[in-house]
Image (tube, rainbow, N blue to C red):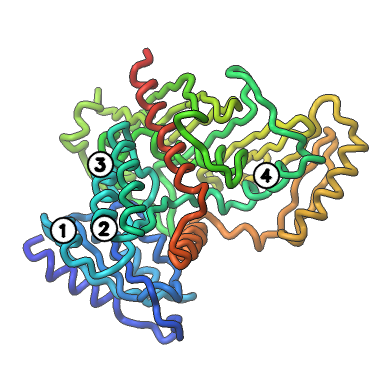
Amino acid sequence: MKNPSVFLLLLAMTIAIPSAAAPTFAAVPSVRLITLDPGHFHAGLLQKTMYPEIDRTVYVYAPDSDDVLDHLKRVSGYNHRAENPTDWREAVYTGPDYFERMLREKPGNVVAISGNNLRKAEYIKGCIDAGLNVLADKPMAIDAAGFVQLKDAFAAAHAKGVILYDIMTERSEITTILQREFSLLPDVFGRLETGTADHPAVEMESVHYYYKFVSGSALKRPAWFFDVRQQGEGLVDVGTHLVDLVQWECFPEQALDYAKDIQVLSARHWPTLLTAAEFNTVTGLDRFPDFLKGSVQNSVLSDYANGEINYTIKGIHAKVTEKWVYKAPDGSGDTHFSVLRGTKCILTILQHAEQGYKPTLYLKPAAGTDPAAFAKALAAGLAQIRLKYPGVELKPLSNGSWQAAIPPTYDVGHEAHFAQVTERFLQYLAAGRLPDWEEPGMLAKYYTTTRALELARKSP
């Protein structure tokens, strides 16, 4: 691109064309958003919705690359969609000094970071030191060195009076919410089992796909996404969501101490193999770039996107597994499996063909539990659940388990979860602080994933 700044300015002006149906807000926005080096589609999803608190002009600082163009096109698509169009105006700067210039100019007070993870911990620390609030996509740290930087960033955030928060969308998924809610009912769930390394009390597994659709279009992945030095391995990337859910569901609103409460027992990792043709389909590139050559053999790329962590958290045995596959079966998408084993009940989320690839929650009485007594406790518990989530039902199954029937209004979809996370962040920003348990929870989470990566790389 011969004159990238002019081109991006023209594209930004195109994005800025308002629609007659675009939303308007009476309140004076208190948040001015900066988007730093957007390279992941999550950066765009943060702007799929508009918020009264956020000014419609967003300041973008990025290197000159296809990543920023893809981001601007995604935001433009939201601005020009027929239904509920947004009205974002993108003020864009590209150049090799984009980070330094952003820190110098500081046109906003909140920085959104979602892209190449190689410099993410550096970005976070630099923004915090400059007195800027940060909303960061996962992972905030992809190795032990990044974890040290993250600890320093939290310390600096206290000194500067700003907030650092990561985007945990899976907390907003309704079956996960209900799994947590039922686990908080002692008469239904009992208490969480301790488990063993061979039979953990908590197990979670997710399967993600390289080829999928986002906002109605086939997702184009940047080539660096397949470089673990830039994206991070699966253990420290999507594995972050799973570790977060273990903490959020099993120890809700409890401040964890990673040095005392977490013990990583073992970890392993293994690659997903992608052919040159598959790589071309998801990136649009007809060859593997030079920075991936060390991971390519016989025209097949090995991407260490899969991993498993066995650990204890406050003495409870947990196992999380992350897997990546090239393409999902027809009619499906990313899937989630979760089981919490209680003394009275086992809560399981399945999302397979039998469930129509929709996450489905099952409640099974634990061995030795009287079915009639369990049904009575379940009825009382369901009444409590309905106070917060009206319309939820439980259907008895022939095997003695129960299936949660959830009204479709609660199933808003993964992309809508980004707005829900942003709204929570805005509430914390208005309050001037995070809940007491959030920061130690983030440190515990990233300690778990980065420590697991160290062990996995040392294992045969």
**Residue sitting at the far front:** 159
Local packing at callout 1 (Cα closer than 10 Å; few below 14, some 14-19, many 20+) is some
Image position of 431 (left or right of 16): right
Q: Secondary structure at mark 4?
A: helix
Query: Hey, what amino acid is under mark 4?
Result: Gln
In contact (CB < 8 Å): disc 4 and disc 1: no
Marker disc for residue 179 = 4
Location of mark 1 (residue): 98
Cα gap from disc 2 to disc 3, whole angstroms: 13 Å
Q: Residue at x 28, y 52 (%)?
A: 39
Considering only order in the chain, which callout, 1 or 4, is on the residue closer to the N terminus?
1
Local packing at callout 3 (Cα closer than 10 Å; few below 14, some 14-19, many 20+) is some
Location of mark 2 (residue): 36
Whether residue 64 is visible: no
Say which quadrant the C terminus sits in: top left
Considering only order in the chain, which callout, 4 or 2, is on the residue closer to the N terminus?
2
Q: Nearer the viewer, residue 289 or 429?
A: 429
Cα gap from disc 3 to disc 4, whole angstroms: 35 Å
Considering only order in the chain, which callout, 4 or 3, is on the residue closer to the N terminus?
3
**Residue sitting at the far top:** 460
Q: Secondary structure at mark 3?
A: loop
Cα gap from disc 2 to disc 4, whole angstroms: 35 Å
Local packing at callout 2 (Cα closer than 10 Å; few below 14, some 14-19, many 20+) is many
Cα gap from disc 1 to disc 2, whole angstroms: 8 Å
Q: Residue at x 32, y 33 (%)?
A: 143
Query: Hey, what amino acid is under mark 2?
Result: Leu
Considering only order in the chain, which callout, 3 or 1, is on the residue closer to the N terminus?
1
Location of mark 3 (residue): 118
Q: Residue at x 34, y 47 (%)?
A: 155
Q: Residue at x 48, y 49 (%)?
A: 168
Whether residue 118 is visible: yes
